[in-house]
Image (cartoon, rainbow, N blue to C red):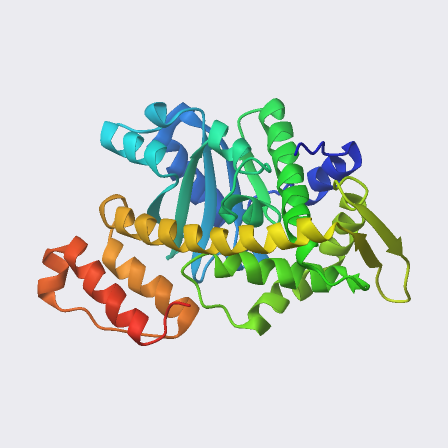
Amino acid sequence: MTITAPAGLITILRQKTSREAPPGIKALIEEILARHRDAVQAILWYGSCFRTGDDSSGINDFYLVVDTYRHAYHRHSYAFLNKLLPPNVFYLEVPHEGGVRRSKYTIFSFKDFQHGATMRWFRSYLWSRLAQPMGLVYARNNHVAEQVYATMAHALLTFITRVLPLMPRQQFTSRELWCRGLALTYAAELRAERRDKLTELFDAVPRYYEELTRIAMDAVPYSVEAMSGNDAWRYRASIPPLTRISSRVMWALRRLQGKTLSLLLLVKGLYTFQGGLDYVLWKIERHSGVRIQIDHRLRQVPLVGVVVLFWRLYRRGAFR
């Protein structure tokens, strides 16, 4: 199934995604560029710090798009791991204005970045993230920027196309579509987000989702009826019963695949991420509320430690 992103969708994403980086983010960008040199093609800022506009507290999240993995690293082992199981994740902090700016950046090659936004990429991780608001805070040139906007448009269409078959046969709103889709994609990771947290993602920028959804509905490979309402558009999708059934099966498989890959990525992060074991625990506590202390012995053998901790956390309900 091939989807062509309409020019109007790309235009709106260009307007909403192009972002002047604040000074603290510029300081982080400069250090990222120093680390990975001219391999860097684009940097996207996303996550809670982006949504609030506060880069001074918390950890700023970035997607770092590079030309090739080999070019991005001094160590060939990092390039190999990034290609084998993308992405690699790194921690970075820089002093700024008497304080510290902290960040976590995730590396994809341009090939994987673009492929991960399409219907050909089964796992939901990348196309579900790129469908959400983020800012393009660095692009090597205008051509690269346009490729990023087009990739985000494809991710948005992939997200909606994958979610539509699981929506009710009666009318539904953009909010209902996105909350359902976010719940599906987050369930395909080692996360335990509360339902109210998922609705907050939509409610933070409802006009963004409403406007893009309205345009995207004209490009999805299903017959979708759009009805204007007092507060928001409502939709009804005509989808064959077999497609609805197969989509439920695919999402069940996607959930199994996603959780497995998420665990493998956490294990890999112990070796590519400074303070990897602490980051794994922080990430789990942040999303599930479950906190576990680690002793000195587990820190000495991180691979064994993460297996033991995974079992303890699982028993305490950190994973679903």
Residue 181 placement (x, y as % from top left): 62, 58
The residue sitting at 35% across, 23% down in the picture is 71
The quadrant in which residue 64 appears is top left
Q: Is residue 175 above or below residue 72?
A: below
Q: Is residue 5 above or below residue 103?
A: above
Q: How many marks?
A: 0
Observer-nearest of 42 and 189? 189
The quadrant in which residue 89 appears is top left
Observer-nearest of 241 and 118? 241
**Quick one: quadrant of the N terminus?**
top right
Residue 313 placement (x, y as % from top left): 29, 70
The residue sitting at 67% across, 32% down in the picture is 2
Q: Is residue 151 above or below residue 237?
A: above
The answer to whether 87 appears left or right of 151 in the picture is left
Residue 144 placement (x, y as % from top left): 58, 26
Taking the view exactly as shown, the residue that stands out farthest to the front is 242
The answer to whether 57 appears left or right of 92 in the picture is right
Observer-nearest of 29 and 90? 90
Residue 53 seen in the figure: no
Residue 124 placement (x, y as % from top left): 52, 48
**Quick one: quadrant of the C terminus?**
bottom left
The residue sitting at 77% across, 39% down in the picture is 219
